[in-house]
Amino acid sequence: MDTSILFWLVPIASIVALGFAFIFYRQMLRQDEGTPKMKEIALYVRQGAMAYLKQQYKVVIVVFIVLAGLFAFLAYGLGIQNGWVPFAFLTGGFFSGLAGFIGMKTATFASARTAAAARKSLNGGLKVAFRSGAVMGLTVVGLGLLDISMWYLILDYFVNPADLSQKLTIITTTMLTFGMGASTQALFARVGGGIYTKAADVGADLVGKVEAGVPEDDPRNPATIADNVGDNVGDVAGMGADLYESYCGSILATAALGASCFIGSSEMQLKAVFAPMLIAAVGVFLSIFGVFLVKTKEKAGMAQLLKSLSRGVNVSSVLIAVLAFGILYLLQLEHWLGISFSVVTGLIAGVIIGKTTEYYTSHSYKPTQKIAESAATGPATVIIHGVGTGMISTAIPVITIGVAIILSYLCATEFSANLLAKENLSFGLYGIGIAAVGMLSTLGITLATDAYGPIADNAGGNAQMSGLEPEVRDRTDVLDALGNTTAATGKGFAIGSAALTALALLASYIEEIKIALMRVVDKSGLEAAVQNLNTESLKIDDAGTLSNAGFSDFMTWFDVNLMNPKVLVGIFIGAMLAFLFCGLTMGSVGRAAQKMVEEVRRQFKTDKGILEGTSTPDYARCVEISTRSAQKEMIGSSLLAIAAPIVVGILLGVSGVLGLLAGGLSSGFVLAVFMANSGGAWDNAKKFVEEGNLGGKGSYAHKATVVGDTVGDPFKDTSGPSLNILIKLMSMVSIVMAGVTVAINIL
Amino acid sequence: MDTSILFWLVPIASIVALGFAFIFYRQMLRQDEGTPKMKEIALYVRQGAMAYLKQQYKVVIVVFIVLAGLFAFLAYGLGIQNGWVPFAFLTGGFFSGLAGFIGMKTATFASARTAAAARKSLNGGLKVAFRSGAVMGLTVVGLGLLDISMWYLILDYFVNPADLSQKLTIITTTMLTFGMGASTQALFARVGGGIYTKAADVGADLVGKVEAGVPEDDPRNPATIADNVGDNVGDVAGMGADLYESYCGSILATAALGASCFIGSSEMQLKAVFAPMLIAAVGVFLSIFGVFLVKTKEKAGMAQLLKSLSRGVNVSSVLIAVLAFGILYLLQLEHWLGISFSVVTGLIAGVIIGKTTEYYTSHSYKPTQKIAESAATGPATVIIHGVGTGMISTAIPVITIGVAIILSYLCATEFSANLLAKENLSFGLYGIGIAAVGMLSTLGITLATDAYGPIADNAGGNAQMSGLEPEVRDRTDVLDALGNTTAATGKGFAIGSAALTALALLASYIEEIKIALMRVVDKSGLEAAVQNLNTESLKIDDAGTLSNAGFSDFMTWFDVNLMNPKVLVGIFIGAMLAFLFCGLTMGSVGRAAQKMVEEVRRQFKTDKGILEGTSTPDYARCVEISTRSAQKEMIGSSLLAIAAPIVVGILLGVSGVLGLLAGGLSSGFVLAVFMANSGGAWDNAKKFVEEGNLGGKGSYAHKATVVGDTVGDPFKDTSGPSLNILIKLMSMVSIVMAGVTVAINIL
């Protein structure tokens, strides 16, 4: 079969995904939105969310214009940057933002409709919420594949060096740079959304629950609407932008590694470049198939609901594992069998990390129950146990990722004895990349189960505030509880896929350096540099290119070994940046929450009628405070993440950057798992007590677990998830700035 | 001058240090111990501390016998281990334990005497407490240099290969292994002591202060004595063993690196081996000189007291910086000028890290004050702000260590352009090692200021429990407050020196691998392995040795570059182990504190007279509970630290181990700084409120900061400091097990 024809599957999958997203969106809109009160509350939330998003995009646009201008200057002014980068950067950011916007718009339309459907039946509620989540999932994968196919076609048309093999290298390394646009937009979405949602949540809890004694989602609390808005801007828009980036990043990094695997054989290169795209395309069809499998019976309990959601995800995952073998066989890709097993490795690793997250954060299991039990001795022991449990919970995910790295590497090299031979290294790294693609291939449906969570949560909030019948609230509570479990699993999955994606990006950084070297240094310069190295294997061909150079050559060239002090210092700084970034975002949440607390206190004080339920609080003012704080606070930490790899690149060169990325990735991954799991466990320890255990609501133990939950909020919803982006963004920035790093350190 | 004669300065310094320690000890014993009540309380504490130490040594002896047996089997049964290791391992452990024992015995004799001296004058109290701390400081450096000189003389006599150059390589790499004995004993001391002290402290606070409302150190609280015992076993014995290990480890690792710098010139090798020992020996004399400079006027405030303590440390540090140039010039060591600057780099880095710790943890500065202010919104915001501040506080120490690495490397290579050339790499790493030696050279006096803290703390406790006059308590309070500042600075210093020492150990691991290769693999095996590598520079000489091989050869041999999946997985696992280890120790403190809480509650319940002050609580029972919990809990995490590098060595080989060490070191360092600084800041935020700010004692804000302080206890006194040992111990285990790693992965 002609490989080029197979490519068209990618844009087709993209259009099908977007088409189904549109159908599900229209279906949802046709549902009844409920009583006037429900509509009113939904409108408040929708307006607040949209107002925030507009504000955020305003800031992001400024950053994008500045960065795109910088890239244009580097490209056209200094000639050390790829000329396509400014445009690729802009489209990446645009599509990522669009995915977040559509997902959030859908979510804010869906919550009241979910509550309204739950008035009729549990199945109805589940279906509306989940199908709306699927809009988000399918939009993300649809737009991702659209951006990828668009750029592939553009570059295929415009980039035409003499040599086809080199053409593919240039195309794939150029496409990779649009990931930086997606990363940058994702960072603002995650950090800004994370600060927004937790400022509102923590603020609402501290004054509302603790001081004034009003329950969660009570309409008397002025911060309630802001809290519900937060679920949308943080959990829906932020999560969507994050995974959009992982999805595109893993596919593009693997494509770049594929082009480097088969240097010399342009046909095989093409197959290796298409393979990750095709696996993703087939994953789209399976995701849509899986969405239709999700339904439940009336009177379904938590276990049955979870089962019906899992059915969709599981069937899609098993099918993609099987079909991967078919796709790669059809492609007749060399090592197809081994590489197929690499795909399976990624899928299994994703499942294990998700299950581990569930074990450590669900109150059906010991760890969270023990945290709840420690509440008998007060908030301090809750915090100590929660931190301890979160730290211990990092062991299995790290070992899983470690085994996945080694196994996917070994599978792709077909268990060759001489693993680190030049060709095998490329194959192995390609294997790691394709494992990430495997993990993310069914994102269309896994993201649907994630986005379902905040929709169900908001539906519960809407039902509470509109004073719906108790049985409706019981139904939305069941839907919401399920959402907490899927959200926790989704977080584990997001972190795991970010780690594998970042690893693939780390490897493709070397590819980018190669291209940058050829762009920045002329033939005689390259020859002089190579001569200095005293290496046999690195040669410059007649055209002045380094096309035959493999990874190990560059490792020697830049001395990327652990005894190089630049590498060591890079690792130290990378590890530190993960902590610093978390510290800054934690501080932001603290400050923003403090402002919210003051505002709520002020409202309670100036208008006594609010607490008596006779006058309406000023919701808009709280929404505005969250919006402004999030805007202000997100700038510093985001700029740090962008600036750090550039500064390290200038001061410590390529070896320092690789150290930085390895240190940031490893520490960032472990820290992210710790923070997400501690936060999730605290949340559910509180729920465990609220379900009537250990004294139940209002007891001393309950108050202690509320403190834990409040501390956990920024852990699990701001700092932890933002680290996913940090580790990918640092790689992306390094990739895009490769030309500058090379120019400063070589010339 | 004959270099060999200079060596005798080392044992002389050792004897002088031990002699002065003995003199100070006798001086202290001659002081009045105060009233019968004071003596009684001091006796309780002393007995509790000694009982604990005996229990701990019993467990440690079993571990030592098992490990020494294992090493003997590897050496004499399988022939893959250096035959001296079992003995070196035992002496290292013995001397480390002895240093802890003497320090703690002194401290427990000194506390009542400090309180008694403070009845007469502030200066008297300061002098007794500080001189007693100096006993600890001088014992540690004295025993360290004794062990080093003893082994040097033994090995110099017994090890006699044909080639003098090789003799020095063998001697230094063998001596390095006694560090594992010191590390292992230090780990148990730090972890066991840390769990003990915080179980007692947290337990005493939770029931005593929070539930029963009795103040700190109130004799009605049954856990008070255990709390005071804890200060001794955790802060004195644990800290002493930790720094004993850093001190010896940095000297020995640098000596091993020195031997590898000058391969081929045995005279220069000898100078490079002696250089770190001589700097340490001169440091001993300067420390003793510094001790005599510490005195103060009556009516001295906090600032003056701090100044008088600092005077001793500062004068010693400035003098050693000057004398380092003299010593290295006298030795006529090649690159002596550059290497002297490396020493200065280490000294300055130590000062910066100490000052940064003070800034982030003292309530004289903004960060801690802000944490205290956040108490207005309750314990949750105190925790959020404290975690955020601790994470942000990692930036300056990491950048300082990074700059110190690069600078000390560059100085030692005399800013050579081709940094990574074979010879320059060795010089550079030697420079990093000698920076660590520089930082630790004045340990005799810096440790005295550390050990002073818990003595003053216990003196305050004794004064409180014995009901001494208010003005005495005011004096001991001033002494205690000063102790908190020096303890925080000391923690920063301990972490910083552990990081530099671990770096030097990381480099000398390669040296150890070289020796192990020659022991395990025969000449033809080596030749075959080298031929496989296709490298020009690595050659086997006629005697079948690799003596000309440098670091970069081994980096190539074992593919220790960042694209090797084994290295990457090693880095991930190393980062994870730091978190896992912290999580386990946090959990231990939580469980042990819970038991203490239950016991105190039981005593309050069964005997109502205790709270009324009419009957004496059962102190012994609380001491026993802490002792047993600490024993039980320390085993698991300690064995993990020992087992991890062995397992990684077996599964992932040399490159995996190097990844593990780099990942563990970077993450462990950052995590340790974060935990120590968060904990210190919470402690002082509470003190800030207690001094009458933000509502003062008993206010809502005070209760919130007490929660922060309780959470901070295991952060700053158990998990954080234990990480210092973890990062050194993992290197030490890898070094000792190098033979096994090589045998399994090469043969």
Image (tube, coloured by chain):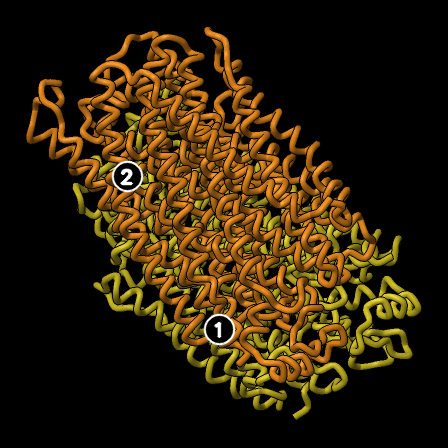
Chain colours: A orange, B yellow
Residue type of the residue flagged with mark 2: Ala
Residue that label 2 marks? A199
Specify whether residue B594 is in view. Answer: no
Q: Which residue is pictured at 16% across the width and 38% down the height?
A: A598
Q: Secondary structure at mark 1?
A: loop
Residue B387 horizontal/vertical position (percent):
37, 46
Q: Which residue is pictured at 56% across the width and 30% down the height?
A: A287
Query: Which one is earlier in the sequence, the residue at label 1 or at label 2?
Result: 1
Residue type of the residue flagged with mark 1: Ile
Residue that label 1 marks? A80
Q: Which residue is pictured at 52% across the width and 36% down the height?
A: A492
Which one is in front, B188 or B732? B732
Which one is in front, B222 or A390? A390
Dot 2 crowding, Cα within 10 Å, few <14, some 14–19, many 20+: many
Instruction: Answer with the quarter of the image where residue B434 lies.
Output: bottom right
Which one is in front, A613 or A686? A613
Vertical relation: A298 (above or below) B300? above
| Placement of the N terminus of chain A among the 4 image quadrants | top right
Pointer 1 indicates a residue of which chain?
Answer: A
Residue A678 horizontal/vertical position (percent):
45, 36
Residue B57 horizontal/vertical position (percent):
63, 46
Vertical relation: B106 (above or below) B220? below
Pointer 2 indicates a residue of which chain?
Answer: A
Specify whether residue A423 is in view. Answer: yes
